[in-house]
Amino acid sequence: MHRNAIPLNVVYRNEVIAMLRLALPIYVELLTAVVAVGVIDLFWVSGLGAAAIAAVTVGTTAEYLAYGLFLAVPTGITVLIGRRDGTAPLAPVIRTGWALWAAFSLAIAVPGVLLREPLAALFTDSPALTADFFLISLAGLPVFFAQTVVDGILKGLGNTTTPMRNALICNGLVIALDPLFIYGLDLGVQGAALATVLARLITLLIALLSVVRLRSPGRGLVAGTVIRTGLPMSGDFLARSLVGMALVEIVAGFGTAEVAGYGIGQKIMLAGVMVFYALRQAAMIRTARSESAGSPLWLGLGSGAVVAIVLNVAATPVAGLFTADPEVAVGFLRWMTLYLVPFGGLIAVGGVLQASGRGSRLLAATLAGFAVQLPLAYLLSSWLGVTGVWLSMAAGASISLAGALARRADAPGSARDRAPRSTRTAADPPSGR
């Protein structure tokens, strides 16, 4: 039966189901590889005191910043492989990905390790512990980056299950290694970083087996295309990481306990936020492969509401697992209700914008939100304390979402984005051939 003969409600229902099926493995992957690793580290070092919690909080925030610098590479790989799959050779994209991995790893990891002490001193009043964490975590960035390249290749081929499996393996290894290194070998916060890097290295060796079997003709590199394609997403992530570090600095002005509470709250919230990023990646993959992304805006807004409700219910008992004084973390999670709904819509919409060649609008909207958020954070925090910082986050997310949706005629989920390969026009993004 022709698609146009199928009732629209059935079409959209099928599209939503397809999105959720693709997004679920991505969520599990993100939850285990990104969130759970940081939460497990935080959980085990919590027994070492507030200074250790602050060190891991700052250390993982810096790692997210470094990932933002590199994110253009795996994002570009996913989109270009999605566009080329079955239509053009994949080898140039894959080869370029590894060349860029080597260049970025050298350019980010080496300066990070050498400058670990002044970097740590910028964000905490216990810089020695943070510098110890940086020594291991920043040196291990090439392993982390390599895993994202492998995952980017597989996702471009529409495979989100294998990255999920690899993330679960890594998570299991961290669970086993963290207590051994932190307490068994008495390595403290360095033990947490070492356990994570070792777990990622073992997982990478397993993951490489998934891509070495790929055989595709084609020569040359497409570095410029990969970077240009992924740059808006990288810029968006990088901006979020920089603002996140600025917020840590603002919160640090209220004391180490507030930084620790903020770190705990952020780690807990990330378990919910990864739902949005899973929807974004699913929308990006389907759009790049000329498949419909359904209605990512409504999926994102609805997910934001559900996540907010769950976090409000779980705030006190979950925060209590990490600290005997959960007041700051619980307050943070309560106020995040105002932030999560618009943020969910913004992130989910971003996948379609990125894959359809409109990532620059997402980046512009993100920057506009931050241009309001940061001054508000400084202003409101002087009046309302840390609560002012939480309110500024909600304002920034709302403004960013409004900016991303400003041009409704070109909104994500439109008929243009749902057009199959055979009906794309010259105005559509290039196929990457």
Image (spheres, grey):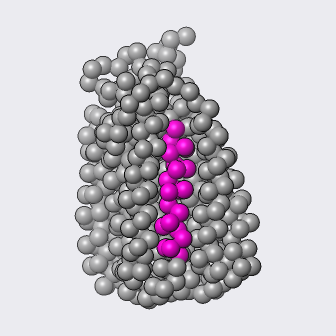
Residue 316 can be seen, yes or no? no
- Residue that appears at 59% across and 78% down: 189
Q: Nearer the viewer, residue 70 or 114?
A: 114
Question: Which residue is more in the foreground, 4 or 149?
Answer: 149
Examine the rendered structure and indicate whether residue 182 appears above or below residue 257: above
Left or right position of 56 against 222: right
Image spot of residue 211 (x, y percent): 59, 37
Span highlighted in magenta in the image: 133-153
Tell me what residue is drawn at x 50 percent, y 73 percent.
135
Q: Is residue 152 magenta?
A: yes
Q: In this view, does 69 lie above or below 134?
A: above
- Residue 379 x %, y %: 27, 79
The question of residue 289 being in magenta is answered with no
Q: What residue is drawn where x is 59% and y is 63%? A: 197
Q: In which quarter of the image is the C terminus?
A: top left
**Magenta region's main secondary structure?**
helix
Q: Residue furthest top?
A: 1
Say which quarter of the image contains residue 113. Answer: bottom left
User: Vertically, is 40 above or below 162?
Assistant: below
Front position in the image: 145 or 161: 145
Q: Identify the image quadrant of residue 183.
A: bottom right
Picture quarter with the N terminus: top right
Q: Can residue 168 be seen in this view?
A: yes
